[in-house]
Image (cartoon, rainbow, N blue to C red):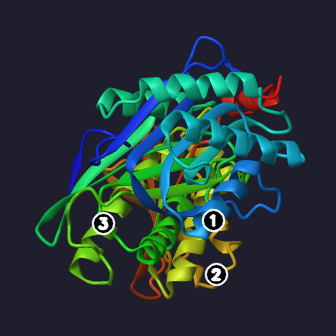
Amino acid sequence: MKMIAGGVTAAKGFEAASAAAGIKYQGRDDMALIYSAAPCVAAGTFTSNVVKAAPVIWDRELIAAGGPVHAAIVNSGIANACTGEEGMRYCRQTAEEAGERLGIPADSVLVASTGVIGFQLPMDRVREGVRLLSEARSDSEAAAEAASRAIMTTDTVNKQFACRVDADGCEVTIGGMAKGSGMIHPNMCTMLSFVTTDAAIDKELLQKAVSAIVDDTFNMISVDGDTSTNDTFVVMANGQAGNRPITEEGKSYDAFCEGLRAVCRALAMALAGDGEGAGKLIESRVEGADTRENARILAKSVITSSLTKAAVFGCDANWGRVLCALGYSGAQFDPDKVDLYFSDGAKEILIFTKGSAADYSEEEATQILKSTKVIIRADMHMGDVSATAWGCDLTYDYVKINADYRS
């Protein structure tokens, strides 16, 4: 497996585009297109929030129906959530407009929206945006990057990654883009992410891979504990790599999963590190747990702790907050057996062991916490299972951004 430059156009047969439709933002692109002339099999996971945006309902039903998928139209600025029957009509109208412009069936077009909840889409602008997208599509790396920027809301950087894997002697490419900065708390996942691949793979196997990988990547991030109404993660596979179709588990399937996991992990870490107002990525590593579920629960509890996040922001080596977060996670363990470490990736110090504070330097700990990536490692000494979760520090700017987001 090799990471490469690019995003959703890295895989053969995929094109992308961006356009400025003026849906909410002015002076920037706010619509994106992903397109494959060859039909794709598609798999996805969606928000578990009971309040689901219209595009989530549209995409979930389209993917469940099992028909071919050719395109995805994404807008930023307005979420098309809590918009009733009119919102659903707008999903269909967007898909119909794209279908007419691209010469494909409307029910082969995914739609996605992100932004403010409760507002209706200005469909005249959306239709014009679809026209612009259809005319601008390209398989260039620049088109993929532009598309990844067009779907941003409060994100400060665009997020795209790609890789290549060997599937039974054939080169298969996987590329993806994601957006997300606030309302980030995994359950499925709080963001929009689209991944493309030229692999030929069975739809059921693709869905199995997506459902498994999301648990260890997008579902292991959190910024603020809020699960969105619009969470969407979709993988489109058009089979243009020419590999022998992956129809059963084995070496080719494992290689594909390795690549998909690498892209999703990179996107997930980028989302966590770009949390609203954030200055630091926090990586929570739990080792020596007794079960996979407990390892995941413990790791996520640390990165969702507001007190821990605030301490990291203030460069305060307050290990008591970490131990407290482990303690209320719901997983059972013996605190006298836990070892806690702080690291910046280059240097690691033991801060808690055998039930009390270790002999460490506060100055060294402070320097580690000044890093843009802070690693908190907990060895539970209960077994051999590990898990990793990602979050960010909690800063003054998070409140500023969200105090006036709607207005």
3 or 1: tag closer to the N-terminus: 3
Circle 1 SS class: helix
Circle 2 SS class: loop
1 or 2: tag closer to the N-terminus: 1
How far from the left and from the top, in percent, is residue 240?
Answer: 27, 56
Residue drawn at point x = 67 percent, y = 63 percent: 61
The residue carrying mark 1 is 301
Instruction: State the mark number for residue 200.
Output: 3
Query: Which residue sits furthest right?
Result: 84
Q: Quadrant of the C terminus?
A: top right
**Residue placed most toward the observer, 183 or 25:** 25
Q: Is residue 153 visible?
A: yes
* Numbered circles on residues, count: 3
Q: Quadrant of the N terminus?
A: bottom left
Disc 3 from disc 1: Cα separation: 38 Å
- Given contact means CB atoms under 8 Å apart, are the residues at marks 3 and 1 in contact? no
Kind of residue at disc 1: Ser
Disc 1 from disc 2: Cα separation: 10 Å
Which is more foreground, mark 3 or mark 1? 3
**Residue placed most toward the observer, 314 or 37:** 37
The residue carrying mark 2 is 331
Residue drawn at point x = 61 percent, y = 58 percent: 189
3 or 2: tag closer to the N-terminus: 3
Circle 3 SS class: loop
**Residue placed most toward the observer, 379 or 264:** 264
Q: Is residue 336 visible?
A: no
Residue drawn at point x = 63 percent, y = 30 percent: 154
- Given contact means CB atoms under 8 Å apart, are the residues at marks 1 and 2 in contact? yes
Residue drawn at point x = 79 percent, y = 48 percent: 88
Which of the 4 quarters of the picture holds residue 293?
A: bottom right
- Given contact means CB atoms under 8 Å apart, are the residues at marks 3 and 2 in contact? no
